Image (cartoon, rainbow, N blue to C red):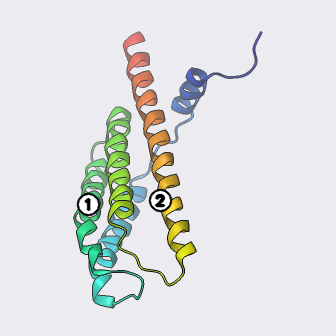
Amino acid sequence: MNNNPNLIDTLKKSIKDEKEVKNSEFIIAIVINIIFLYIFNNLLNWHISFITNSFQDVLWIINLTLTFTIIVNALYLFYQPKWLRDSVQIIINILGFLVVYFLYAVYPFKFSQVFISYGLKLVLILIMIGIIAATIYQIMQLILRIYLKLQK
């Protein structure tokens, strides 16, 4: 008998072990995302030496992602079934991937040291890989949640 849990067992366990989310967590997320909106929309005004004017080219996807996240967290204050949270998390992951992709593609940074630029590009690639893995996991969890719901 194999005592090693497979992916399906791991997903089932994570679904069963989910903690209830408190409304205060959604309020905190809203406040933090509003702060991030303010920061990102003012970075160019602050003339930070390593951020170039091409940051403006990625600001639209950052604003879209943060605004979507604020709206979703506000919705969760009133309505938060687990299937909706799973579905929306997939969308947020995709938007997050796009943010990182555009930061990589546009690369609105200029560092005096080349190795810092290469290091940051590598970090952006690793983040994209991590987001892809998390999204695949989230999709599998959503499918399993729907399957288990249909089995009842």
Q: Amino acid at mark 2?
A: Leu
Helix, strand or loop at label 1? It is helix
Residue ID for mark 1: 61
Q: Is any atom of residue 102 visible in this view?
A: yes
| Residue under the point 32% across and 75% down | 40
| Residue under the point 39% across and 61% down | 104
For residue 27, above or below residue 134: below
Left or right: where 97 falls relative to 59: right
Q: Which mark is residue 113?
A: none
Query: In the rendering, at what x and y percent does residue 39 appear?
Result: 34, 78
Query: In the rendering, at what x and y percent does residue 17 appear?
Result: 57, 34
Residues 41 and 116: in front is 116
Q: Which picture quadrant has residue 68?
A: bottom left
Q: Quadrant of the C terminus?
A: top left
**Cα–Cα span, label 1 and label 2:** 16 Å
Query: In the rendering, at what x and y percent does residue 10 appear?
Result: 60, 27
Q: Which mark is residue 124?
A: 2
Of all residues shown, which one is farthest toward the front? 114
Query: In the rendering, at what x and y percent does residue 105 appear?
Result: 34, 60
